[in-house]
Image (tube, rainbow, N blue to C red):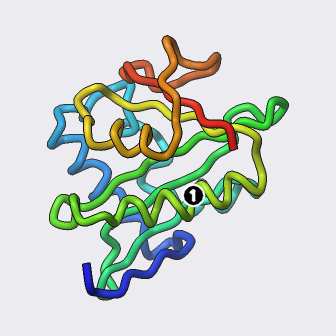
Amino acid sequence: MNKPVVIREIEAKDDKAIEAIIKRSLENHHLDHEGTAYTDPQLAALSSYYHDRPKDKYWVMELDGEVVGGIGIGIYNEKESICELQKLYLASRVQGKGLSRELMKTALNYASAHFKQCYLETRHELEAASYLYEKYGFQLLEKPLKGSEHTAMDRWYIKDL
């Protein structure tokens, strides 16, 4: 893309836009049900959810002043210094243009400074996402890490930072 993109921490004004992007993406993949991010109680207010947790961060991506995607890092297991890559979603109109790589760089740069490993959960239907995670060095696990809440996920990855 030749248009400039801005990646910044989420603000309250972004909540509705990123919630819509996440829900639409999950609906498009028939993942709008219990056990996915679709039913996360914090989805309507991601800005306050992440701001209330000092080590957790969520970034939105703007294109021409419009929020078109986002990505988060949250503590998964603080004792073992494991974070979780969370809620990487792009609006369908900007998918396939390399923008997710910019979000991944932002999140993994932050994670590398604060954690030893990064974990994530996804679904086999999200093939492009799995390809992206593997490209960034995530290793497929046989089962979720202890404490997993998204019961509908069927692919789990971890990466040493």
How many marks do you count on the picture? 1
Residue at (31% x, 69% y) in the render: 68
| Quarter residue 52 falls in | bottom right
Q: Foreground: 86 or 40?
A: 86
Residue at (42% x, 44% y) in the render: 135
**84 horizontally vs 15: left or right:** right
Q: Position of residue 2 (x, y in %)?
A: 26, 85
**18 horizontally vs 121: left or right:** left
152 shown above or below 53: above
Label 1 neighbour load within 10 Å: few <14, some 14-19, many 20+:
many
Residue lying at the far right of the rendered structure:
79
| Quarter residue 54 falls in | bottom right
Q: Quadrant of the N terminus?
A: bottom left
64 shown above or below 121: below
94 shown above or below 23: below
Tag 1 secondary structure: helix
Q: In which quarter of the image is the C terminus?
A: top right
Which residue is identified by label 1? 107
Residue at (34% x, 66% y) in the render: 99
**84 horizontally vs 80: left or right:** left
Q: Where is residue 136 in the image (x, y as percent from the top left)?
A: 49, 46
43 shown above or below 37: below
Residue lying at the far top of the rendered structure:
142
Q: Foreground: 19 or 83?
A: 83
Q: Position of residue 64 (x, y in %)?
A: 29, 87
Q: Foreground: 33 or 132?
A: 132
| Amino acid on which the number 1 mark rests in the picture | Ala
Residue at (54% x, 44% y) in the render: 85
Q: Position of residue 43 (x, y in %)?
A: 43, 49
